[in-house]
Image (spheres, coloured by chain):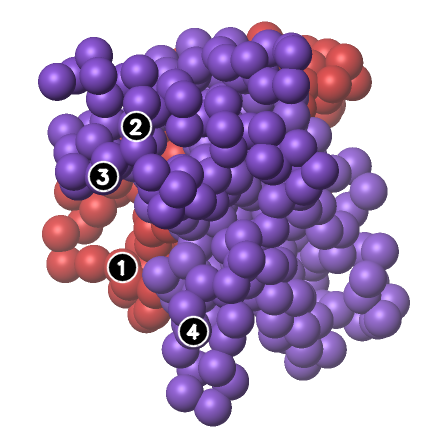
Chain colours: A purple, B red
Amino acid sequence: MPELPKKKVGLIACSGEEIPEGTITRLAVRRVLESLRPQQSVTIWLPLFLAGGEGDRAFACFHPTIAVDGCEKRCAARGTEMYSGKPAVSIVVSDRAPTDSSELGSARRLSEAGMQVVNSLADQIARHVDELLGLKWDRRSEAALQSAKPQEDFKLSQTTCSCGSGIPVETLQVAGREVTLIGLPLVFAQFRGEGKLPSNSTKTELIETLRIYNPIPHQEEAAYAEAILQKYAAFCRRSN
Amino acid sequence: MKEKVLIVPCSGIGKSLGSVAREGAYIVTEELYPEQTRLMPLALLVLGDKETQTEVSSVGAIAIDGCARACAAKVVEGRGGRVARPLQVLDLCRRHPDLKPSGISELDEAGHKLAQALAVEVKALLDNLKGEVTHA
């Protein structure tokens, strides 16, 4: 059975080695990965878009991403959009750091003020992870609660898997127009493998799963749901 | 050396090897050869704007990779530079089996020692090129 990618958020730090803000992005992302949201986040390494395989470039097609840049050059955000998909969130440290750059320390060794920015930036990234995955967080137990309504507006609108990733997409008619959904065949195969029949409850599950990877406008949710369910019913008939 | 040689370290944040590459690059550019070298962030090369491409193709560059994926070398080449000799921390680890680095955000003692050893190798490379570095 094909395996669906887990619901995780990809974190891309610019890691700019020549400025302290670049170091801040790197350390903040590590903090999220190691301590704050280890189960909900993964890192994507920007140079792998060029040096790696298709899988690296495909990631942002299939997962929401957060680009964390040190300066206004926004290498992480622009590079991700150029080679993979538009980041759902773009943060620039130099825009938000309350401290003058010279007080952050050096790129090699951050000052105490620089480390404070690391911590607040990591908290900000963690909040964005929660929003993108629709998670509520129990601050006392430091554990993720049941998924709340997944956020639907992370922007995958420019990702059609023309990246050559091989991630299957499928086109269907929604409200009289063609819509391409990323990962639809994988989702169908997984649901079918779990024995889920085409029903209203399955319809709800399908739409909730697919909206993690595809922008589904609220006002068109019902139309999407109907079209997806019909497609799923046809898929189940074919696979009988 | 008329122009500063670009030192392009791995920018990985998933392994200690990347941190060693980065620390080694800082030692070279800040302590050993501050007047002759300049650190070039890999992310800037990934974007490949015209100015950066021109610089990397006209000025000498030493790519220091963490692992065999060799992203720094590949990106330098992809942007018009030429890597004549690969330099990888993974190889360095084989030459120094007693040093097993750990830590990413903060390298441990072995990691710092390995970074020092790396910097010495880069320095030797620069010295061997006797001021006529085009690409390494």
Q: What's the mark number on residue B101?
A: 1
Q: Observer-nearest residue: A191 or B131?
A: A191
Residue tagged 4:
A145
Q: Is mark 3 on a helix, strand or loop?
A: loop
Q: Which residue is drawn at 61% across and 66% down?
A: A127
**Mark 2 and mark 1: span between their CA atoms?**
45 Å
Q: What's the mark number on residue A188?
A: 2
* Residue B98 in the figure: left or right of residue B78: left
Location of the N terminus of chain A (image quadrant): top left
Q: Name which of mark 4 and mark 3 comes first in the sequence.
A: 4
Residue that lies at the very extreme toward the bottom in this rendered image: A140
**Mark 3 and mark 2: span between their CA atoms?**
9 Å
**Mark 3 and mark 1: span between their CA atoms?**
49 Å
Q: Is disc 2 in contact with disc 4, using a CB cutoff of under 8 Å?
A: no
Amino acid type indicated by mark 1: Pro
Dots 3 and 1 on the same chain? no
Q: What element carries label 2?
A: helix
